[in-house]
Image (spheres, rainbow, N blue to C red):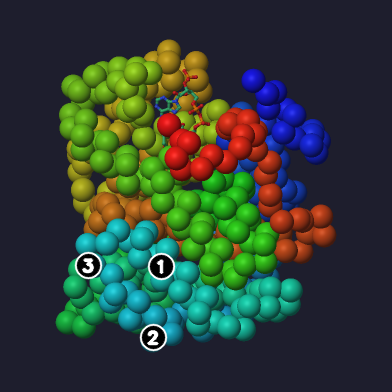
Amino acid sequence: VMDIRSLYSDMDLFTYDPGYTSTGSCKSAITYIDGDEGVLLHRGYPIEEIAEHGDFLEAAFLILKGELPNDAQRTKFVTDISRHSMLNEQISFFFRGFRRDSHPMAVMCGVVGAMAAFYHDSININDPHQRMVASYRLIAKMPTVVSWTYKYAMGQPFVYPRNDLDYASNFLHMMFATPCEPYKVNPTLARAMDRILILHADHEQNASTSTVRLAGSSGANPFACIAAGIASLWGPAHGGANEAVLAMLHEIGSKERIPEFLKRAKDKNDSFRLMGFGHRVYKNYDPRAKIMQRTCHEVLDELGIKDEPLLELAMELERIALSDEYFIERKLFPNVDFYSGIIFRAMGIPTQMFTSLFALARTVGWIAQWNEMLTDPEQKIGRPRQLYVGSPPRHYLPLHQRG
Ligand code: ACO
């Protein structure tokens, strides 16, 4: 048997690191995470302070440009984003091509990718101005895309953006207004939605962000790169977890059944995992989960929802898991997705939409990281190596000689 190493004539040294658990792929000045301490900073500012004092567009400005905006910059940014909130009317036909029961993430992959065919001036990725225009367009149009996936699934007419509303309120308006009934924005719900968007805006080199960087490293169109990020986010181990948490809570059904499911989560022969628990980087409480839990209580109070069984179940599950040896040893804590689904549900957002809301928020991080990558003089096309474990070299056999 031939030694496989003889296949590598260019046997230069590389690391084999499946899942990139110890490989840094880039330098970045955007987000800092200390997973052991449960710290998350954007451009140096703690997530707790941004979520408490800022709003989503301010966070977007910070993440994209590196500093908090002053008053004039903030006004201009808000105006510029509003001006891009409409979709080209032709794009509405893309929605109409899908089955009404399509998963919103499938529709988003298609529609956002298709946007590359509409905004031709965004093709010049070496021009910083054009890159910023593409970034503004993506941030501005994403609420329109996400709400239209919902309207289409509901069989309702698309609602156009209202530029007099703030970002989160406008999104809720496009989701819930109909031609027969305007949507009266509830400031508590709008603030909660805004905060959820802040909490999801960026999280350094996770799977979807790395996908956007990898796609972009070849010089690909920004809308195509973001469509790639949406595809990567969809999986239940990543952004799809918020949807999976709710499905899991429904499956567990009652507090009495928690021990049974915890037992399953610990059983290595059972594929069941506690969704919304664990994180590749956080080996402590995810700071976003704490804010999310507080926001969850605020929303339920505002809506007068008392004794929400799913929230009670979630809190009990958290309590029991955090005192369980298995979860303590492995440092498995609730992550950002654990409570977000309960808030979305209370707001009347269907479970299937949860991951698209994550994508809406994360667009800021994706496009900021894409911009950063393109201005990094050390950046090369992303091209990992592999450890070949296939057949040694052999000769092609004519058909009649094969067994
Ligand atoms: N339930 C039960 N056991 C778990 C869980 C869980 N949710 N998460 C990790 N473990 C166990 C693993 O089985 C493993 O145990 P072992 O050492 O005995 O083999 C150990 O904890 C380490 O887990 P890994 O899978 O090696 O950790 P990794 O960093 O690769 O995975 C991940 C992180 C994917 C988030 C994982 O914790 C998971 O699947 N969680 C559930 C899905 C989820 O909530 N995803 C959202 C992530 S946050 C986000 O994307 C916004």
Q: How many marks?
A: 3
Rendered image: mark on residue 90? 2
Crowd tier of the residue under label 1, counting other residues whose Cα lies within 10 Å: few below 14, some 14–19, many 20 or above: some
Q: Secondary structure at mark 1?
A: helix
Q: Tell me, yes or no, if residue 291 can be seen here.
A: yes
- The reply, left or right, for residue 272 in relation to residue 288 is left
Quarter assignment of residue 102: bottom left
Residue at mark 2 to residue at mark 1: CA–CA distance: 14 Å
**Residue at numbered disc 1:** 110
Residue type at numbered disc 3:
Arg
| Residue 302 visible in the snapshot | no
On the image, the x and y values in percent for residue 271 come to 34, 27
Mark closer to the chain start, 2 or 1: 2
Mark 1 and mark 2 in contact (Cβ < 8 Å)? Answer: no
61 lies left or right of 95: right
Residue 80, percent across and down?
57, 81
The percent coordinates of residue 236 (x first, y second) are 39, 43
What residue is shown at x 35% (from left), y 77% (from top)? 94
Disc 2 residue crowd, few under 14, some 14–19, many 20+, Cα 10 Å: few
Name the residue tied to disc 3. Answer: 100
CA gap, disc 3 and disc 2 = 18 Å
x and y percentages locating residue 141 in the rendered image: 46, 74
**Disc 2 residue lies near ligand 1 with CB under 8 A:** no
Q: Is mark 1 within 8 Å of ligand 1?
A: no
Nearest the camera: 5 or 312? 5
Depth order, front residue of 384/328? 384
Q: What is the secondary structure assignment of the residue under circle 2?
A: loop
What amino acid is found at the position of numbered circle 1 in the picture? Gly
Question: Callout 3: few (<14), some (14-19), or many (20+) C-alpha neighbours within 10 Å?
Answer: some
What distance separates the C-alpha of mark 3 from that of mark 1? 14 Å
